[in-house]
Image: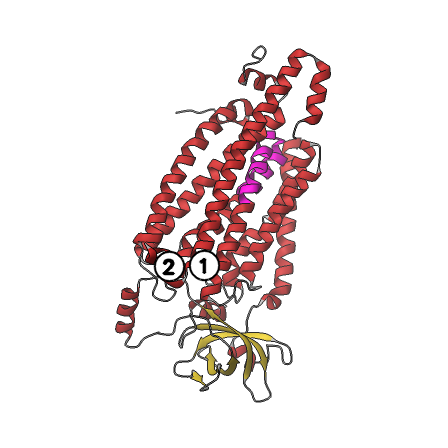
Amino acid sequence: MTRFLEMGGYAWYVWMAYGAVAAVVVAETIALKRRGRRALATARMVQQAAEAGGDSLQMIESKGTR
Amino acid sequence: MKPRARRFAWIGAGLVAVVAASALILNAFRSNLVFFFTPSQVYAHEAPQSRTFRIGGLVQQGSLERVPGTLTVHFKVTDTAATVPVTYTGLLPDLFKEGKGVVAQGTMGPDGAFHATQVLAKHDANYMPPEAQAAIDAAHGHAGAMSMPSLHEARAQ
Amino acid sequence: MIINWFRYASPVSFYPLAGRLARVFGVLAAALALIGLWIGLVAAPTDATQGDAYRIIFIHVPTAWMAMIVYVAMAFWSALALGLNARLSAMMAQALAPTGALMAALALWSGAFWGRPTWGTYWAWDARMTSTLILLFLYLGVIALRQSIDDPRRADRASAVLSLVGVVNVPIIYFSVQWWNTLHQGSSISLTAAPKMAMIMLTGLLFMTAAAWCYCIAASLTRVRAIILERERSSGWVASLIGIGTPP
C-alpha cells in the first residue's frame, strides 16, 4: 500500500493531478445538485405567486436568480 | 432565400472568414511560434544571433561529459545532420539521457558553443513496460536507440 | 423505428428525457472510471522511461480531449441556436461551457504536474500549451459574456458568436505538435497509425476516455435541466411539472 502511494517517487505529481480531478468532479456534482434544487424551488415560488396574484410574483421575479 | 437559410449562410460566411484570417495570421507567425531551433537551423543562421533562443535535438551518444566536482556538463545536441556543443551548469531533468530528446535555452557563445541556462527533456509519445523496452533495445543491439520522431517529422515538412 | 426527434427540440419533452439520460451516463461514468483507475493505477506496469509519472496520462489525455470535444459541441449548438433561433440549442451551449472550462483547466493542471518530473518544467510557452491556455480563456470569455448580458436571448446570440469564432482554436491545438517544434510530444494514438503504447496502458486510457465522455454528458445534461427551469419557470409546463395550476 505504501509502495502504491509512493508512485515510484512521483507521489507529489501523480496525486496532485489525480486529486485535482477528484476535487473538481465532486465539487461540480455538488454544485449541479444544488443548482437544480434551487431552480426547482424558485420555479415553485414563482408559480405559487402567479396563482396567488400579480404583485407578489413581481417581487419574487426580481429577487430570484437568473 | 428564407430568413433561416440566410442566417445559416451568414454563420457559414463568418466562419469561413475567421478561418481564413487565422490561417493567414498563423502562416505569418509561423516562424515565431517555433519553440526551438534545430542544429541545422542554427548553422543556416535561421536562429537569433545575439538573443536568447532554444535549441532542440537529440543528445549525441557518448557526448555527455561532467566536469568533476561541479554541476557543469558538456554535451552535444544533434539532429543527425548538424551538431552543436552545449555547456550547462545546473540540475538536469530525470529524463535527460544520451540518445534522447532535449531542449536547451541559452545563447551562442563566441566559442561556437551554446551556453544553456535551462535544459528540458523532450520525450517521445511511446509508452511501454521496462521489459518490453529491454527487449527492443536487445533487438537493436544497443541501449537507447535514437528516437525523436516528431523532430524528423518537423524537419521533413 | 421512427422517432420524432423534433419532439425533443422542445424543453417540455426534453426536460424529463435529459434527467433519465443524465442518470444513465452518470452511472456509466462512475463504472468506467473505476475500471479505468484500477487499470491505470494498479494493473498497468510502470513506464520504461518515465516511471510512474506517466500514470498522469490516464487523466491528462481524457481531460484534454474533452476540453476540445466539449468546445466543438458548444460551437455546434451555438450554430444551431443562431441559425434556427432555437432556445433549447442555446441552453445546451450554455450548459456545456462550465464543464468544458473545467476540463481545460484540469488538462493544463495535470499537464503541469506531468511536465515537471518528465521535461523539467511545470510550464513552457510552446504552441500546444499556449493554444490550450487560449481554449480555457475562450471558455471563460463565453461564460463571462453571457453573465454580462441581462436579456437571455441577446446573451444567447452574443455567446454563440464568440463560441463560433473560437472554434478555429481547436484544430490549432490538435495539429500544433505537427505544425511547430514543440516541447510537447506528438500523439500516442491516432486514427492512421498503430498506437505507440503497450496494450494494457492503451486499454486503461480508453476506459478513462469513455468515463470522461460519460461524465461530461451527464454533467451537461444535469446543468441544462437547471437552466431550463431557471429560464422557463414562469411557463405553464413548469407549473404542471411541479404540480401547480391546470395542465396546459
The residue marked by circle 2 belongs to what chain?
A
**Residue at position x 46%, y 85% in the image:** B69
**Residue at position x 54%, y 53% in the image:** C171
Say whether residue C102 is left or right of residue C149: left
Q: CA distance from mark 2 to mark 1?
A: 9 Å
Say whether residue C156 is left or right of residue B120: right
Point out the tag, 2 or 1, that comes first from the N-terminus.
2
Q: Is residue B156 above or below residue C229?
A: below
| Residue C148 image offset from top left, x and y in percent | 70, 39
Q: Farthest residue toward the bottom?
A: B111
Residue B54 falls inside the magenta stretch: no
Colour approach in the figure:
secondary structure
Residue span colored magenta: C71-100
Q: Nearer the viewer, residue C166 or C63?
A: C63
Q: Quadrant of the C terminus of chain C?
A: top right
| Residue C98 image offset from top left, x and y in percent | 57, 42
- Residue position for label 2: A7
Q: Are marks 2 and 1 on the same chain?
A: yes
Q: Is residue C90 above or below residue B91?
A: above
**Residue at position x 46%, y 79% in the image:** B78
Q: Is residue A48 above or below residue C208?
A: above
Where residue A13 is drawn, which disc sits there? 1
The image quarter containing residue C3 is: top left
Visible in this render: residue C168?
no
Query: Does the magenta stretch mainly form a helix, a strand or a loop?
Result: helix
Say whether residue C171 is left or right of residue C211: right
Q: Residues within 10 Å of mark 2 (few under 14, many from 20)?
A: some
Where residue A34 is drawn, which disc sits there? none
Say whether residue C150 is left or right of residue A43: right
Pointers 2 and 1 in contact (CB under 8 A)?
Answer: yes
Q: Nearer the viewer, residue B151 or C83?
A: B151
